[in-house]
Each structure stands twice: as structure tokens, then as C-alpha cells.
């Protein structure tokens, strides 16, 4: 149903920039997202405060039951993803132009809650590009680096793996060729700085290279960054995803060094966009998606399964472990459907040996309600079923 659908995602806000998502010419189930310059952060912040009042029904709605038929065949598994299984993104904090600007300031207690809930890793999106000089050697601001170190140490000291993810690099998305040197320069500093850190720190080269990033330019950047990083961090896991917003359909375009076995391949999953991004302020036209349900019909489930199977097929033939590094449904969708979709995506990933990290902890998609100081029970149960 996505094929041929052309939705141009435009920017609704001015000022700082942040990713948004869109779809166009997308094969079934794969999310193609359009990077745009808008203040998704401020939008997420606004949403955070309206989270519990999202959809007001005028009459009670009947909730159709979920299809519970089992898959006819046992799905194939991706090569084992060592060290991580269930994680959460600490989104809207360190990838905001300034921490707090998008309503999230990281706290020690968040790491405790994450550990206690049974997650074994966090993905920490960081806007390095917003805190580094524009001229070579692209020096990263020392205070910012200290703050990120603090976050990494909060995770590591609790036995959580920390994926340090270069996020919100808008300049790169606009001019990938022109930013190549700066991208490598940032990784040069980071790899040196974190060289002595435990193996439980992973690096993620870049969040969601958009469709504006040609596959060959991206592959060139990957190879350049790996060369630099491997001189000081020979054994550290490095997470890499394909262009087209880390879309499953572009996995085939990734070119990775055969001999480097410490690479995890990531994809992001938000399909169907009409459901997961209904009413998302940073996706133009998404207001008309409001009210979209995901009840978990046989067809809806089959679409998710076939997307994941495609990823697994690629992973098996390329002998790479898989991480679904982002997936989630915005708070504007009905909670009952959010939990169904989220739980289903998580279980189907697990069946296929795919590690996952939910987008995100305590903002607009939040599994945790920072105002109330507690998890949203239905969502956390969908992610980590009690007793499992
Ligand atoms: C972006 C966020 C966005 C989320 C879902 C992330 O990769 O950085 O701004 O809210 O995807 O669209």
C-alpha cells in the first residue's frame, strides 16, 4: 500500500532542526523518512505535556480483537546479536540543540528505572555536530563531552550497554559530500576519547542518513570512519544502518568490510507511518491520519513479519547481526493499539534474533511518564512482558 505513495514532508517549524519522517515511493512496510528542518523537539515537548489527553472519544469505541493465528512457518533467525537484546532510546535529550530544549534532561534515576525494568541497553542519541566547531579539527566542546561521558557512565556503571549514536547531524544530510571530512573528524576525536572505555560502550556512526545521502557517499563515510575508529578501538561494536532513514529496503546497499565482525547492522521501523506518526507535528499531512488504528489483523501482522523477514534474509546472506534501533508509535495514537503494535513488533523481532530499542524513554513516544515518575504500564508490559 506504500508503493507509489508520495508524501513530501515539509518543515513546519523554524529555528533549530531535527528529523522528521515522511514517506514516498516506499515498498510495503518499509519506512522511508524525510529529513526536514523543523523543531521536532519543541513539538515533542508540547506533546509530552498533552500525552495523557491525546485522543478524546465522544462515544465509546468498540475495540476489535487482535488476530491471534500463528505464523505458518517458524521464521528464520538473523546471526546472533551479542551483548544486547532489549533497549530504549534516551531520545529528545542530548540530540536537542541544548539538553532540555526538547523537554528532557537526563537524570540518574532514569538509568536506574531502565535497568530495573529489565532493559539491557540504552541508545543515547547525541548531536555532536551542534557542539563542535565548523573548521578542522572540528573540536568538540569539552563541557558537552563531559555531559555525554556522564550519561555513558550512568549506563555502564549499571551494567547496561550504551550505544553512543551520532544523531541530528542535519548539515550532513543537506551536504553529505561537503560534510564528509567533518564527520570523520568527529569520529577521530570520539574514538580517541573513548578508546579506554569498556567494551559495553558501542558506537553508532550516524542516525538515519536520509534519501539525500547517496549510497556510495555513505559507504565511503562508513569505510573512512571505521578505519579511524579501528586504530584505537579494534574490538568495540559499531552500529551502522543503511541510507533512506535506516530503511530495511536499503540494507542491500550497505557495503561493509568483510573481515570486521564487530559490526551490528541497524534498521528503524515505524510502519505503517499512518498509524505510528498520526498527528506527528513534524510530518506534514499527518493530521489526516488521526484515528488510524492498528488492531493487529492478520494482514497487518503479515506486513510486519514480511518486513522483518526481509531484514533477516539480508542479515543471513551477509552474516551480520541485526538491531531494530528505533521503533515506536506516537502518543497521539490510542494506547490500546500502540501497545498491540509495539508488543507485536518487539516479539516478532525477538523471534528472529533481532535486538531492539524502543523510541523513546520519556518524551512524545515515552514508555516512561516523567511527570508521574512511573512507567506507562501497558507500554512497558508490551515491551517487556511481566516475568519474561
Ligand atoms: C528522530 C526524532 C523522531 C523519531 C520518530 C528519530 O530518529 O530523531 O526526532 O521523533 O525519529 O519520528
Image (cartoon, grey):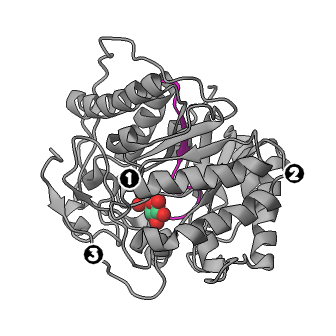
Q: Nearer the viewer, residue 64 or 178?
A: 178
Report ligand 1 position as a quadrant: bottom left
- Of the numbered discs in the image, which one, if any, rests on residue 230? none
Q: Is tag 2's residue or tag 3's residue first in the polypeptide sequence?
A: 3
- Of the numbered discs in the image, which one, if any, rests on residue 215? 1
Residue drawn where x is 29% and y is 18% of the image: 69
Measure how far apart labels 2 and 1 are at the Cα level.
Answer: 32 Å
Residue 47 coordinates in the image, percent (x, y): 44, 71
Task: From the viewer's perspective, tell me whether residue 281 is left or right of residue 187.
Answer: left
Labels 2, 3: front one: 2
Crowding at label 1, few (<14), some or many (≥20) Cα neighbours within 10 Å?
A: some
Q: Is tag 1's residue or tag 3's residue first in the polypeptide sequence?
A: 3
Tell me, yes or no, if residue 204 can be seen here: no
The quadrant the C terminus occupies is top right
Measure how far apart labels 2 and 3 are at the Cα level.
Answer: 42 Å
Q: What residue would you read off at disc 2?
A: 196
In this rendering, the answer to whether 358 lies above or below 133 is: above
Magenta region, residue range? 352-367
In this rendering, the answer to whether 107 lies above or below 388 is: below
Residue 31 coordinates in the image, percent (x, y): 32, 50
Q: State whether the magenta stretch is mostly helix, strand or loop.
A: loop
Labels 1, 3: front one: 1
Crowding at label 2, few (<14), some or many (≥20) Cα neighbours within 10 Å?
A: few
Q: What residue would you read off at disc 3?
A: 10
Residue sticking out furthest to the top: 73
Residue 91 coordinates in the image, percent (x, y): 57, 62
Amino acid at each position: 500500500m506504500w508503493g507509489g505513495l508520495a508524501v513530501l514532508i515539509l518543515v513546519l517549524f523554524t529555528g533549530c532542526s531535527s528529523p522528521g519522517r515522511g514517506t514516498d515511493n516506499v515498498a510495503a512496510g518499509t519506512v522511508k523518512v524525510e529529513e526536514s528542518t523543523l523543531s521536532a523537539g519543541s513539538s515533542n515537548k508540547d506533546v509530552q505535556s498533552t500525552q495523557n489527553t491525546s485522543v478524546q472519544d465522544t462515544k465509546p469505541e468498540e475495540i476489535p480483537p487482535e488476530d491471534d493465528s500463528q505464523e505458518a512457518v517458524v521464521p528464520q533467525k538473523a546471526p546472533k546479536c551479542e551483548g544486547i537484546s532489549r533497549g530504549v532510546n534516551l531520545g529528545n535529550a542530548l540530540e536537542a540543540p541544548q539538553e532540555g530544549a526538547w523537554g528532557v534532561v537526563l537524570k540518574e534515576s532514569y538509568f536506574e528505572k531502565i535497568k530495573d525494568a529489565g532493559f539491557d541497553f540504552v541508545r543515547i542519541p547525541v548531536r555532536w555536530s551542534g557542539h563542535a566547531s565548523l573548521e578542522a579539527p572540528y573540536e568538540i566542546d569539552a563541557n558537552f563531552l563531559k555531559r555525554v561521558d556522564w550519561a555513558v557512565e550512568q549506563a555502564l556503571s549499571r551494567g547496561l550497554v550504551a550505544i553512543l549514536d551520532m544523531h541530528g547531524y542535519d548539515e550532513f544530510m543537506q551536504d553529505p559530500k561537503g560534510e564528509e571530512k567533518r564527520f570523520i573528524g568527529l569520529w577521530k576525536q570520539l574514538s580517541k576519547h573513548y578508546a579506554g572505555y569498556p567494551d559495553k560502550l558501542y558506537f553508532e556512526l550516524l542516525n538515519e542518513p536520509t534519501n539525500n545521502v547517496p549510497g556510495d557517499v555513505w559507504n565511503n563515510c562508513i569505510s573512512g570512519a571505521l578505519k579511524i575508529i579501528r586504530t584505537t578501538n579494534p574490538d568495540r561494536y559499531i552500529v551502522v544502518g543503511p541510507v533512506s532513514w535506516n530503511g530495511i529496503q536499503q540494507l542491500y546497499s550497505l557495503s561493509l568490510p568483510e573481515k570486521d565482525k564487530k559490526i551490528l547492522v541497524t534498521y528503524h521501523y515505524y510502519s505503517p507511518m499512518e498509524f505510528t506518526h498520526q498527528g506527528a507535528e513534524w510530518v506534514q499531512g499527518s493530521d489526516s491520519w488521526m484515528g488510524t488504528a492498528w488492531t493487529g489483523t492478520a494482514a497487518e501482522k503479515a506486513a510486519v513479519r514480511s518486513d522483518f523477514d526481509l531484514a533477516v534474509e539480508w542479515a543471513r546472506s551477509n552474516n551480520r547481526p541485526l538491531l531494530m534501533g528505533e521503533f515506536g508509535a506516537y502518543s497521539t495514537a490510542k494506547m490500546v493499539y500502540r501497545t498491540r503494535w509495539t508488543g507485536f513488533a518487539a516479539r516478532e523481532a525477538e523471534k528472529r534474533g533481532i535486538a531492539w530499542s524502543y523510541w523513546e524513554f520519556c518524551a512524545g513516544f515515552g514508555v516512561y511518564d516523567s511527570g508521574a515518575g512511573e512507567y506507562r504500564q501497558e507500554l512497558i508490559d508490551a515491551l517487556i512482558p511481566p516475568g519474561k
